[in-house]
Each structure stands twice: as structure tokens, then as C-alpha cells.
Image (cartoon, grey):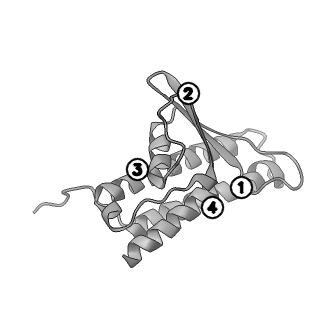
Amino acid sequence: MKILGKYKVSTDFIRSLTINCHALDLSAHHLLVGGIHSDSSLRTKEIYEEKISTSLLSLAVAVRTLLYQGVELLVECPNINCIGFYKSERNNDKARVSIKDVCDKIIHADSIDREFEEIENADPRPMTFIKGSYHKKPWQLDISVSMFCEYVLNWVDKIEKA
């Protein structure tokens, strides 16, 4: 009996990973900066950083796997330029960014950084800075993870309706 053949990822699995990433993004400021938890040992911060980075990577790999399964033939992977900014020193890099492109950047990133404003009315959707290089030329994608997740959920809805 053959148990596994090709990699298989369902839209339900992607939806679950997306919800996790969305929740991690929106809870970060309150948990790490604005809440009552002091985290004097920084263990909560360390665990949070590991959880958000591994969750984002898992989501990116799952989305790319779903695309390899032929989903893009049913529903086009939309451009989502409004979730952030892409900077690169390569002249031929494109300015438009799709869900697939964001996933590729997450997978190939050298680092993922976040900054939190320690002010009373801080933006609840912090920017995440995904950085890497291609042929020794640095690139950076600055995104709102929660907005990216909402676009992924909308895309999954379209896939399920197709």
C-alpha cells in the first residue's frame, strides 16, 4: 500500500496556518510591548520570534505547494502591492508583488525583523522586514503580515469557489 505520493496541501490547512500567522502578528505588540507581562528574561520574546518565523515559513511552503498542485490554473495568484514595499538593487526585479512572490521571499529570506513602537496608540499592524540577497544584491520586502494573511484567506475563498 502506497501512503504518500506527491505533496498534498489542502485549502483548510492553509487557512489554519494563515489564521495562526494573523493572530501572532496582531497579538505581538500587546504581548511584547503594551501588555502587563514584563518578560524580564526575554524568553517570551525569543519563543515568539521562533513561533512567528516558523509559522510564516510553514505558510509560505504550504502556499507554494498548493500552487505546484495546479491551483493557479483555477484561480490566478493576485497582485497584493498594497500590503507593503519591495526594495532591490537589481534592475530587472519587478515592482508588482503577488502572494507567490511574498512566499518566495519568506522562503529565501536571510532574516525577518520587526519593530514595535512603544507609544500608546501604536499601529496594531506592525511592519515585518523580510531581507535577503540574490546574486549578492540585497533585497527587502516590508509587509504587514496580517494584511498578507487576509489576502491569502481571500485567495483561498476564491479557490474553494472555483
Residue positioned 49% across, 60% down in the render: 17
Q: CA distance from mark 4 to mark 1?
A: 11 Å
Which callout, 2 or 3, points to the residue nearer the camera? Answer: 2
Query: Which mark sits nearer the N-terminus, 4 or 3?
Result: 4
Taking depth in this image into account, of 43 and 156 the one nearest to the observer is 156
Q: Residue furthest right?
A: 120
Q: Hey, what amino acid is under mark 1?
A: Arg
The quarter of the picture where the C terminus appears is bottom left
Residue positioned 57% across, 48% down in the render: 51
Q: Hey, what amino acid is under mark 2?
A: Glu
Q: Hey, what amino acid is under mark 3?
A: Val
Which callout, 4 or 2, points to the residue nearer the camera? Answer: 2
The quarter of the picture where the N terminus appears is bottom left
Q: Residue furthest top?
A: 136
Residue positioned 55% across, 27% down in the render: 89
Q: CA distance from mark 4 to mark 3?
A: 19 Å
Q: Circle 2 sits in a helix, a strand or a loop, which is it? A: loop
Is residue 57 something one can see in this rendering? no
Query: Which mark sits nearer the N-terminus, 4 or 1?
Result: 4
According to the picture, the residue beneath numbered tag 3 turns out to be 61
The label shown at residue 117 is none
x then y, percent, for residue 73? 31, 63
According to the picture, the residue beneath numbered tag 2 turns out to be 89
